[in-house]
Structures are given as structure tokens and as C-alpha cells.
Amino acid sequence: MTGSFAIGFAAPVSASTSKDSTLIAVCSLEDVPIAGARVIERPQHPDGNVALFRTAENRVFAVLDRCPHKGGPLSQGIVYGDRVACPLHNWSIELGNGAAVAPDVGCARTFPVNVERGIVFVALG
Amino acid sequence: MNARVPINRPKLVVVGNGMAGMRTVEELLKLAPDAYDIAVFGSEPHPNYNRILLSPVLAGEQTIDEIILNSHEWYTKNGIALHAGRTVTGIDRARRIVATDDGIAAPYDRLLLATGSSPFILPIPGNDLPGVITYRDIADTQTMIAAAREHRHAVVIGGGLLGLEAANGLKLRGMDVTVVHLMPWLMERQLDRTAAQMLQQSLEAKGLAFRLEAKTEALIEGESGRVASVRLASGETLAADLVVMAVGIRPNVALAKSAGLYCDRGIVVNDTLQTFDPRVYAIGECVAHRGLTYGLVAPLFEMAKVCANHLAGYGIGRYAGSHVSTKLKVTGVDLFSAGDFTGGTDTEEIVLADPAGGVYKKLVIRDDKLVGGVLYGDTADGAWYFKLVRDGRSIAEIRDRLMFGEANLGDTGHQGQSRALAMADDAEVCGCNGVCKGTIVKGIKEQGLFTLDDVRKHTKASSSCGSCTGLVEQLLMATAGGDYSAPAKLKPLCGCTDRNHQQVRDAIREEHLLSIPATMRFLEWRTPNGCATCRPALNYYLLSTWPKEATDDPQSRFINERAHANIQKDGTYSVIPRMWGGETNSSELRRIADVVDKYQIRTVKVTGGQRIDLLGVKKADLPAVWADLGMPSGHAYAKALRTVKTCVGSEWCRFGTQDSTTMGQDLERALWRMYAPHKVKLAVSGCPRNCAESGIKDVGVIGVESGWEIYVAGNGGIKTEVAQFLVKVKTRDEVLEYSGAFLQLYREEGWYLERTVHYIARVGLDHVKRKVLDDADNRRVLWERLQFTLDGEPDPWHDMAKARIDTRQFEALALA
């Protein structure tokens, strides 16, 4: 139904209020498993790591690796459509905007992503 | 709703703003929110409300506002044009236009008729007098409430469900009420004579009067022009300032008939809820489906799901008719009936009667299946019996305990409570998610939850371990009005499909499907790549049906089976080295101790399965931990063989009769790497003292002097289930063959996430005995198939390449 086969589709530009939204190259697209994720490590950052998702339709999203429910690592969940199911309590999170799928309520922060010539760029802010 | 909505969408007109029509619209909006411009016509001036709850309103237990299901804002928000208070009087099918009594003409591309039914009015003199009403809608309810304020005497004609609820409400509002009923006992369509008499007694104790086998002859006008009395055929005259006729309903077919649509008792529809004009759908009380009409809400909701699916253009799903159950909503009277409760020459009955204690239960059985029943005084197990009726499963195994109800409302997590109604609002129903009764009841009332799934999604109750499902179903029955929409027999695997587990299994086998995409294509999945519920199930079905042919899809496995370790709440993992049969040695223990030191593992815990659990391992450390341990890491978290517990047996124990440790190790070595529908636990004890607790395992083996006894389908979890005796054998090889054959049968026939105890409850132990005991060839073939499956399966901890483990998951991406 999505009908999108565009490789390198960018996540919607988030309404990030961050001062620094420079895109940084983090890996090549092929480094991220299809219908899977990789963890971008941020050991010093108070919010912790960022999960980089690649869907079965080759769309790429970056979401804070913490479920809004109980902080579960979203990067470890099952990816389906443009969503991920948290491995701890099975909340579903929309990768595009980080929002929990109703009736659950909550939101994980998302980060702008761009894929150019097979390289994934993320603005971690 | 948003800017992408096409301008020229097809038009859907819904005639009837009641529960059936609006449920269909709600289901449609869920599937295809932007598919139609929707217009709804309803004769009543109100938005859609819960008609079932009119009786509590009449009884003063709820208000009209509380029973509104869809507010005016809901219609606006969803872009639906609501024409409340307008009656559709004609349909021009050639021009595809409906016309109303006040001159509106609305064009349609699809038309949905949900015109409901009308109360039957007795053709007797005086039936049109002021003060003579039926009981169907909010206006009738308000008339009754008003009459109760000014008048004294009420007569209700009709001792069925609706009549009794009306009588009860009027009595509670202070009227003297007499119920006149034509038949020899009350609610004859739902109750047998005994239950009806008990009901009558308890209603008489509440102050209601009855005239049975009484025919109403005429309604007599008083001096004020209002009805004053009711004359019966016996000559008796009953004073009556208010007469409520509740003698049955008739499907509203006049509109459909005038449009030339084929009708008999109702508007005739096929299994996709289409009338003889394929553009015109019909649903609810107005339809006749396979010759039956329905007047309860659960079947209407089942129809709504199917109808919405077809309106949305998916074209999946058929409505195949419904089983119905009834619950009388009179506070203080517990009454439940379902299915065929009268029985006949080909049925048997189990009856429990305690008239003094006010309890009566009758269960009707045909061909080892529960086909119906009546419960009076104690209806706690109504939902369970109804489920047995719908599922049509054999009750031969539980026949001796059937009458005593579903003890497995759950043993743990809610203090052993089993009567939802007796619980306080702040009592915990769901121990996993901390959900109280009050929260569930509030959700059911305020958000219009009607199904177990709805309650699970919105409140989380019963969504984890499921042990409180029975309690939640009781709350649904009590709150939503008794005939809530119970999960149908053919419950779809998930929201991505209408197929159930069995249909998916069958298709994979019959069509030789070998991959998840191929299965989804063949079975017309609604989502591009499934969801977190269906993908793991499909992956398992493919691997268990076509070993060595289907390829594993790690991305469709839960993280524990993808990372081969057990995720913890803080995102670290636990590792449980496999110690065969629970036996270890100094060199293994030394390696474990070194690993604990080297990787600073915080907690070391001895498990219930006789293993050592290392908790708090960082994901990045997992491969190194495994390599240093040099032991397989135990599938201690997977839907697979977990552990084989053993006692020390005859090698050491002065009571031991058999070498249970070696037997357990042999079993574990033969069965490890075996994925299954759910986790599988084994135990081997060396004597009947049973120190390895074989009695609560999926397969429990107990050594006796003359051989081994094999027990199956035990469970030590949420609900403790004692394993059932399968067979006694003599040799070690027989233990392996019989246990392996049973497990292979379960692997091939079980539904994903179905433990052996539930699998056997579904198929019956006799079925297993036929396949594994009676048929020696089949047993050998099953055992061979399992060995074929496991042969050459890699050790995922030490042969990652062959096990196709994506090692990228252990390496984080670092920022420069």
C-alpha cells in the first residue's frame, strides 16, 4: 500500500529546535540490516543512544533508542512497515514521528536523516 | 481529514444511525479512513447510543449521556454528514439516490441499510391509546420514566428478556408492575422451565406480579382518554396506566422492499452482507442471513467487521453466522443462556440444581461437544461455557470437571479472585500491568469497548500473561451488557489478515509456501510486511513445516532469538550456559567464574531450570562471553527446548530406580536447538518421589522399577497444570522416540504461542494417543522428521556464520 520503492527516502524533517542540525555521515546504507536497525552510540550524551532503522521498503529513520513507555531499546525491536515494536512490552512506535501507536500515548524523539549515494547522514543536534 | 483526500471520492450512504450501522462505519474508518464521503441518516434525533443499556437507564442505574457511543463531535471529526431525525422514505436504485421525508435527496455509490427492527404491536382493541407503548428507543424509555412519576399501575405484555427488563425498571421507579406472558414460563426462548421458575420467584421477591399462559384481549380506555386497564382472555382485568408491549421485534424491511430488494423475514444478504443489488449492503437486525435474523449485538458486530472489510475494498472475510448468548440485565439476578439449551433425543444433559441456594446450571452436550447451557444464580463461568460452545471443541477430557467451571481464571496475580462482580473497584484484575477493576469498567463504558481485544489495547488488562482473561470477560459481560462481542471461533492471527492460525498453517503446507513474502502474497495479507505478531508466527510455521527448505528470517524473530540471549529491562542481556541435564563440573564452573570477573557481570543467579544465569551482559560483549564460556548458551529464552531438569537418580540416590541424569542428558542432547510453537520444558525423575518435578512439564519422565512413565502437557506457570499420563515404556530409546514423536506432533500442529497444555486442550489427548501410541509407524515417522529437522542445525553461539547471525548487531556505530 505504501508503494514507495525510493531508495534513500529521507525521514520527514523534524521540527527540531536544536541549534546544531548538521548532517553527519554515520555509515553506509548497506551497514544497516533490512527490516532492522543499528545503534549509534553516544556514551556521554544524557539522552543515550540513537537507533538507526532501515525498513523493508528501504526507508531510513533515526529515533532515540528509548521507548517512551519504560525506556526499552527500540533498536532491538521487530521492524514492520514504518514502525517498530519495542522488545520490552511490545509498544508500537511510528518511526516517522516517534509517536506511540494509539491507544498508547508517548513520543520518542526523532532526528533528520538523509541518504545520499548510499551514505546515511543523521542530524543528531 | 487531511489535504490528501481526493475530491471525488465515492459516496457511502448509511440508512440507520444505530449500533450496527455505526459499528460498520467505525470499522471502515479503521481500514480505509479516506475511502468514502459518508452520510448517515437516522430517524431518531440522537447520535448513536448503546441500545442494550437502555434497561440500566430505565432502572436509574445509568443516564442517557452515559450510553452515547458516538458524540456529535465524533461525526464532525470524521467528516461524516449526520442527518439525525430524518427518515429515509425511498431509494431510487437506478439513479442511485435516497430520498428523505423532508425532501433531501442524497446520491450514493454504495448504500448500507441498517434499518434495524421495530417492536411488534399486538392487533388488539385499544393498542393505539395514549399510555400504550413499546420498548425500543430513548423516547420509549423517557416515556416510561415520565409515566412512572405520574402513574401507579403498569402492565408489561411479554415475559421475554426485554419485557422483564422493562418491568424491573418500572418497578424500581416505583410502579406496581404485572407481567402478562402468553407462554407457560418466562423467557422460554432462552430458559428451560426450571431456570425460568427460579427467575420468576426471585422477581416476585422484588415485587413483580405475573400472569402466565395469559392472553391479552383488549386494552380499555379510561375517562381521561388514556389507557386504564388490560382485559385478559380469562376475564380478569388488570389496572394499567401504562402498557408496555414487548412481544418481539420485526426486521424493518419496508424501505428495502419498496426499492425492489429481495426480502423474506429480513432483507436477504449473502456472506459478504450484500443484498441482491451488489451496490447495496445491509447489516444488523434488519437482515436475514442464511434464513436467520439476529437481535443481539454480538452478531451485528461480527457482521460489521466483514461488511466494512468489503466496503473498504479488501474483499476478505465472510460472515458465516453467529452463536448467540443472552444475559438478563436485572441487577441482583444472575442469568445466562447460550446455544441449544433444550436438548433433544441426541443430547445429554449435566444438571446441577440447588433451589434453596438459588443456583441452577444445565449443560447440554452432543457428540462430546457442549452445544448450550443455562446458568442461574452463578453465571461466573458463562463466558467460558459460551466459548466452549463456539469453539466446538471436544469436552470429553474435561467432562467430569465441566460443571465446576473454569478454575483457570488464573491462579496467580490477582489473589485467586474468580468473581469479577464481587470485586471492589480498586481490586487488581491484571497483576502484570497493574490494572484495577475500576479502570477496566471505566474504559468499557467511556470508550465503548466491546471486545476482549479492545480492552487489551486500551487498558492493557489481560494483554500480557492472559491469566485474568476470564475476569476481564466477566467484566465485559457485566458492563457492556452481557452480549458483548466475544472473540469469534476463527480468530484472525492478527490485524494484518482475516486468516486464523490453522488456515495459515494449512495454506503453508498445502501450497508448499517457503517464505514469508510468498505466504503473505498467497493469503492476501493487508500489510506490506506484516507486524510483530504475525511475522514470528509465519517464520515458525515455515520452518516447522518445511525444514531444510524454508529459510529462517532473523528479522522476523523476537530479539531474544535474533541475538540468542535474553533481553533485560535495562537493555542488557542475560546468558545461561547450557549444562546438560543440569550437571556441571569444575572446569565449566571455573570458566563461568572467569567470565563473570572479566566482563564484570553483576548478577549470577541459579535458575529454576537447574542452570546458572549471568545477568547484565552488554550486547557488545556477548560474542566474547560465548567464546570464553565455550558452552552453548542454552536457548533459555527462546520458543524452543529450554532445559531438561533431572534428579541425581540411581547413580547416587538411595531411592533412585533409574539413571535419570543420563536419561535427561540424552533427551537434552537429542532435542536441543528444537524450536517449537512456545517454550518447551522437560524433566526426568529417577523415582516417583519426583524431585525433578516432572508433573508440571511439557514432557515429564518418571523412572519406576520396571521402566519409565511419560507425562505430557504439564505447566508450572500462570496456571499450574498437572501433566497427563501418556504411556509407560521400558527402554531409554523408547523414551526418546515417544517423547520426540509427541513433541514433533506438537511442533507440526500447535499454533504459535500455544503451550502443550493448550494444544492438548484443543485437540484432545486421545488425538495424541492415536498419532503417537496406536500408530507405531506414524510415531517412528514423527521421530524421524524431528531428527531430520535438527540434524546439522548449527550452534548459534559458536558457529555464527552457519547460523546466519547478523554480527553487525553486536557492534555499535560510533560517531567520529
Image: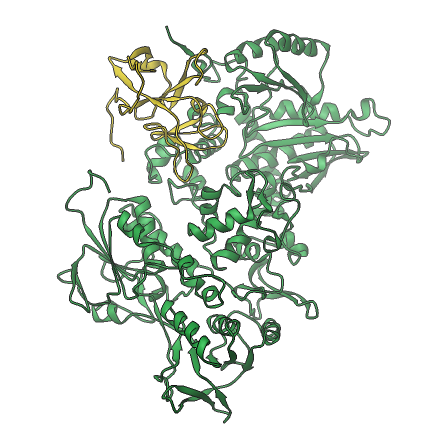
In the rendered structure, the answer to whether residue B292 lies left or right of residue B332 reads left
In the rendered structure, the answer to whether residue B454 lies left or right of residue B674 reads left
In the rendered structure, the answer to whether residue B116 lies left or right of residue B361 reads left
Picture quadrant of residue B594: top right
Residue B479 horizontal/vertical position (percent): 50, 56
Identified at 26% across, 47% down, the residue is B313
Q: Quadrant of the C terminus of chain B?
A: top left
Residue B690 horizontal/vertical position (percent): 77, 34
Residue B132, above or below A118: below
Residue lying furthest right: B654
The hue of chain B in the figure is: green
Identified at 38% across, 86% down, the residue is B226
Residue lying furthest bottom: B235
Picture quadrant of residue B146: bottom left
The hue of chain A in the figure is: yellow
Residue lying furthest front: B150
Residue B712 horizontal/vertical position (percent): 66, 39
Picture quadrant of residue B617: top right
In the rendered structure, the answer to whether residue B399 lies left or right of residue B792 reads right
Residue lying furthest left: B95
In this view, the residue in front, B735 or A107, is A107
Residue B304 horizontal/vertical position (percent): 35, 54
In this view, the residue in front, B612 or B690, is B612
Q: Quadrant of the N terminus of chain B?
A: top left
Q: Is residue A61 visible?
A: yes
Identified at 46% across, 17% down, the residue is B805
